[in-house]
Structures are given as C-alpha cells and as structure tokens.
Image (tube, rainbow, N blue to C red):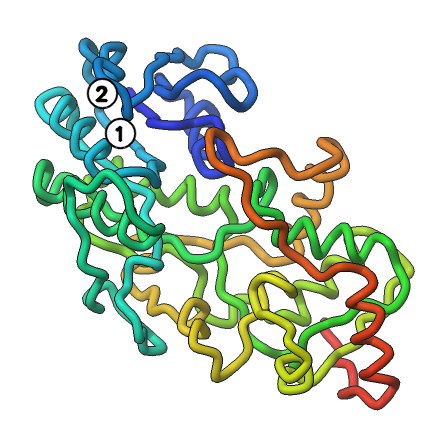
Amino acid sequence: MRLLVLGGTGFVGGAIVAEAVHRGWSVTVFNRGRHGAPPPEGVRRLVGDRTTPDGLAALADGEWDLVVDTWDGAPRAAQAVARALADRIDHYVYVSSASVYAPPVAAGATEQAPVVDADPGAADGDYPTLKAGAERALREVFGDRVLLARAGLILGPGEDIGRLPWWLTRVARGGDVLAPGPADLPVQYVDVRDLAAFLLDAGVARRGGAVNVVSRPGHATIGELLTAGVAATGADARLRWADPQQLLAAGVVPWNDLPIWIPEGHEFRWMQQLDVGRAYADGLTCRPVADTVADTWSWLRRVGTVPARAGRPARVPVGLDPAREADLLAAIGDDQPAPVRFG
C-alpha cells in the first residue's frame, strides 16, 4: 500500500505513520517540517504549507492508494488538497471529530445526527465548524471515496493535550487524590493505536461515509482508569472519591479541571455515550484500559513531559492546581462514597 499522511508528526498522525510502517507499507508524509521528530527510517517526507500560495507544490506529482488527513484548520485548505489529489488517489480518510454534531446532542447519537452548519470554503471558525466544513469539502470532491472518522476522546502514548498524562503525573505524586465520582461512571474513549489500525483497515476496505470511532460506552469506568493509574505508577496514592454534585457546586469544571470526567446530566455527557455500532461492525477493536494507561505512563517517563502540539497554538493546561485540590479534599473530609473494588 502506498500511503500519504497529511500531517504525520503529531499525536494521531504519528500513530498512523508508525502503524503503517509496522505493516510494511510505502509511507509518505506531507507537512511543514517545523515540528515533531523526523519521520521513521524509510518514510518519505514532503515539505509544504497548505495554507500558503503554492504551498502544495510538493504534492504536484505522485500517486497513492490511500490518504489519511488529520487537518483541523481552515476548510478551504482541505478543499484545496482534495482538488489537487482527486485524480491521483484511490481513497481518502479524514480524521474528523464527534464535535461536529449540532447541539443539543442526544445520548446514543449515531452518524445520522445533525451536524453544525459549516462552509467548505471557510478560512476560519471554531473547532466544530472547522471539522464540519472540512467534511463537506471532502465529500464534495470525493463522494463515497472519503471516510469521515468522527473520533471521540483519544488517549494513549504520545497524547499532546495531556488529559491522561495529567492524571498519571498527579497519581505518581502520591497521597490523597481527588477522584470524581461515581467510580463506576462509564468512560468512552479510543486508544490512538487502535484508532490508527482502524483507519488503515477502513482505508484498505475502501469504506466511505461517516463513522463514530471510539470504544463502546463503558469499555472502562473512571474508577478502572484511575485504579489502573495507581497500579501503573506504583504510587502510594489513595483515591478519594467525591460526589459529583459536591464537585460541581464547588465550581469544578468537568473535562478541564478533572480531565476525562463528564458526570451524568452534564450538557456534554453525550461525548461519552456515542453509538459505535458501525465502527465495531467494521472491525474496531479496543485494548484493555490497563494497557493504555500503563503504556502511556511508560511513554511519559521516557519523554519527561507532554510535548507541544505540533504546529498548533498552545492550549490552556488541563487539571486542578495542587492548592485548589487540597482545599477540595479538605472540604470533602472522610465522609466519602465507599471505594469500588475492581478485578
């Protein structure tokens, strides 16, 4: 297989390149060449900036069986790439996002749920409209030759947002750890390596249309994830489970202050309740949460810190400040829900 990865140096793109190299494919990456580690040995690197005039010159020649695109910028840049490659590729896979669904989003949303209105020729926008606009642009060019992979929460080695790394770093410090209850709250996510394998398999199979790519709801729970973190780090840490209403009343922001956690009844709870029937029917498999957590901790110890997001503005850091966590732990006291035992 001749694979072209548009990007290839970030979290998801890097995992796709690694999986394709492991399969023995012929891999080319196209990016600005400003960020990230050099591509693995044997990978051809083309340099260009799709947002500038003549930025696609490096793609003027060449043919590929499959393109995988991780773009989250202006839709018109995705449109320009699609038009440039339309006659020289067999199939296109776009790494989109469940964020394209138009609010309010119902629990169990399928790929047929309405998406936000977006312009395929737009030069700017917020994240949902950028992704939705790119989807439209690619569909207009490729039709059934494009797979729109609407990923949910992505975790695993290389994560450059820092959600799971924050939890692992916090647990590794030991002591009492503020844990957002209930411990049996289902968590829905996908390991980046499982996502990469699914995307390449789907590309080989020439699958088109939209697909939610994330684990089944309840593939893991928040308790299983944090308990796996304690086991992976070997830390002397005690998970102090807090009632979700108590945390919300104290101003704790789900997803940001306590990463990954979205309590029942929250407006964004649907993000961990997506319907994934099509993805599993198409062959998605998801490794155990303990493997994702342990491998992420091994990677984090090796690199030392969460890397900057390749080619993107810095994000607001996730996770509670230690002093605020200490205040919240003091407010909880020892009157907390009984711990949930696992396995």
x then y, percent, for residue 267: 43, 77
The residue under label 2 is: 64
Going 74% across and 65% down the picture, which residue do you hit?
227
Q: Quadrant of residue 333?
A: bottom right
> Which residue is labeled 1 in the image?
67
> Looking at the image, which is closer to me, 10 or 68?
10
In depth, the one of 101 and 224 nearer the eye is: 101
What residue is at 48 percent from the left and 84 percent from the top?
Answer: 265
Q: Which mark is residue 135?
A: none
Work out which quarter of the rendered image holds the C terminus and state it. bottom right
Image marks 1 and 2: residues in contact by CB distance under 8 Å: yes
242 horizontally vs 29: left or right: right
Q: Residue 264 or 196: which is nearer the viewer? A: 264
Residue 270 x/y as whole percent: 40, 73
Type of amino acid under label 2 = Trp
Find residue 283 and report its horizontal and vertical position in percent.
Answer: 34, 52
Disc 1 residue type (three-letter)? Val
Does residue 151 appear to the left or right of 65 in the view shown?
right
* Vertical side of 160 occupied by 342: above or below: below
Q: Can residue 313 be seen in this snapshot? A: yes
> Of 306 and 237, which appears nearest the observer?
306
> Residue placed at 25% from the left, 28% from the top?
66
Question: Total of numbered circles in the picture?
Answer: 2
Quarter of the rendering occupied by the N terminus = top left
Give the CA distance from mark 1 to mark 2: 7 Å
Does dot 2 land on a helix, a strand or a loop? Answer: strand
Vertical placement of residue 305 versus 180, above or below:
above
